[in-house]
Image (cartoon, grey):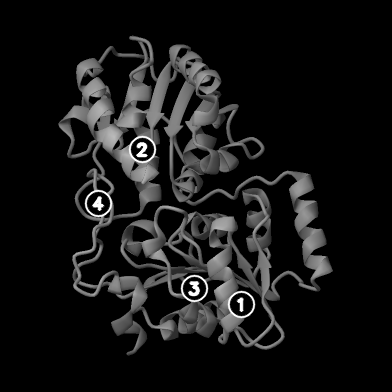
Amino acid sequence: MKQKLIRIVDKTVIAALVWMAGRRRRRGLDQQGGQHWVVIKLVGMGDAVLMLPALAAMRAAGKRVTVITSARCGQIFAAPGVADDVVVYRKRHWWEHGRAVWQAMRNCNGVLDFEQHVFWSTAVTLLSHAQCERFGFWTESGTRNRGYDRLVDPGTSPRPMKEIFDELARAAGFAPAAGLIPLPIAPENEERVRDWLQSNALNKGGYVVMAPGSGATVGFRRLPAGAWAKAIAAVPAGAGVVLVGTRIDAGLMGEIAAAAKRTVFQETTFNLEQLGKLMEGARVVVATDSGPMHLAAAMGARVVGVFGPDTPRRYAPYNQVSESVTLDLPCSPCNNCWRYQEARCSNPDAYACIRRLPASLVEAALRRRWDAGAGSDASSGSAITAERAHD
């Protein structure tokens, strides 16, 4: 209910404020002259991971980077060396955090808004002073587009979101690396994971990590517990199986562990740096279309991405040793991140794209990734559909 209320306020009250305040300007700002830049990303931990190359390019160009974000994404941006300042907005401390947002916007020379459709981020962008140049994505909302001086068109066909994010950075004069960048990890977080692995007798390359959750607001992306339990059966005997998530995922993880026919470790207390370190040492990571999936890919892991309503053509794990599984139904993808529209299933068999996805697809992909770990890393990632997997 709270999420629905937030969307209603965004589409009514905030949209109206953006319409009144927004105005297109091109003032010829020297894009490389201003030293302080603000980056906006309010939601989407996976998007935060995909943004790391853009942020690294900005800092490599000598810019001071302040990121305005929410709590979950904040863990990515607060990792060592990712940004100079991180403003995590929380409603509980709205006055203090609101003042920090205001000060950042009034002192910056440029803004990169990485949000795709919400009016909240545009409203924050419009707090910047008149000489600040604002970069954002073209969307189907003419009102939202009024809030930016320069727009990047993502195109109509799905393509990797990482590459779209890079285009926004390039529009502002920065040059992101072609691949993903690993999340920097503080020494104390590396130490905690080493101790945890040692206490559970798990060695690097000798375990599989599974991340079955999908966050509090997108439960429709989750593969059923029974399918995860069947996929665990594909893990070779003698290898460890680690289920990871947050307290939100604890119920699902418990169901999976109860249905599995072997010992399964469960971990819900790792922060994102610790999770990244755990995934870095895994032989394979299997994850729902989610932030942990992108984190695993950034850490160089062999990833099996499990897709339902969205498409791996946009969000597949972005490295050359990973692959995705999807039914690729005619009604998929049913959400469009360039339009203010959450996933609305039109299939008479609700969310069949994920609920009916055969566990055998995940099992087969897991075995391929496991076997690839015994040889070279030359195998290339791909999207595996039901039809191709059964050939």
Q: Amino acid at mark 4?
A: Asn
Q: Amino acid at mark 2?
A: Glu
Query: Dot 1: few (<14), some (14–19), or many (≥20) neighbours within 10 Å?
Result: many
Alpha carbon distance from label 2 to label 4: 13 Å
In this orientation, which residue lies closer to the viewer: 92 or 231? Answer: 92
Alpha carbon distance from label 1 to label 3: 31 Å
Indicate the secondary structure of the residue bearing disc 3: loop
Q: Is residue 84 visible?
A: yes
Name the residue carrying label 3: 379
> Closer to the N terminus: mark 4 or mark 3?
4
> Closer to the N terminus: mark 2 or mark 3?
2
Instruction: Residue 336: give its label.
Output: 4
Query: Dot 3: few (<14), some (14–19), or many (≥20) neighbours within 10 Å?
Result: some
**Residue displayed at 32% across by 61% down:** 310
Indicate the secondary structure of the residue bearing disc 4: loop
Q: Are marks 2 and 3 in contact (CB under 8 Å)?
A: no
Alpha carbon distance from label 4 to label 3: 30 Å
Looking at the rendered image, the disc whose residue lies closer to the viewer, 2 or 3, is 2
Number of numbered discs overlaid on the protein picture = 4
Name the residue carrying label 1: 257
Residue 9's x, y, as percent? 29, 33
Q: Quadrant of residue 198?
A: bottom right
* Picture layout, residue 391 above or below residue 83: below
Instruction: Residue 113: give its label.
Output: none
Q: Quadrant of residue 247?
A: bottom right
Query: Dot 2: few (<14), some (14–19), or many (≥20) neighbours within 10 Å?
Result: many
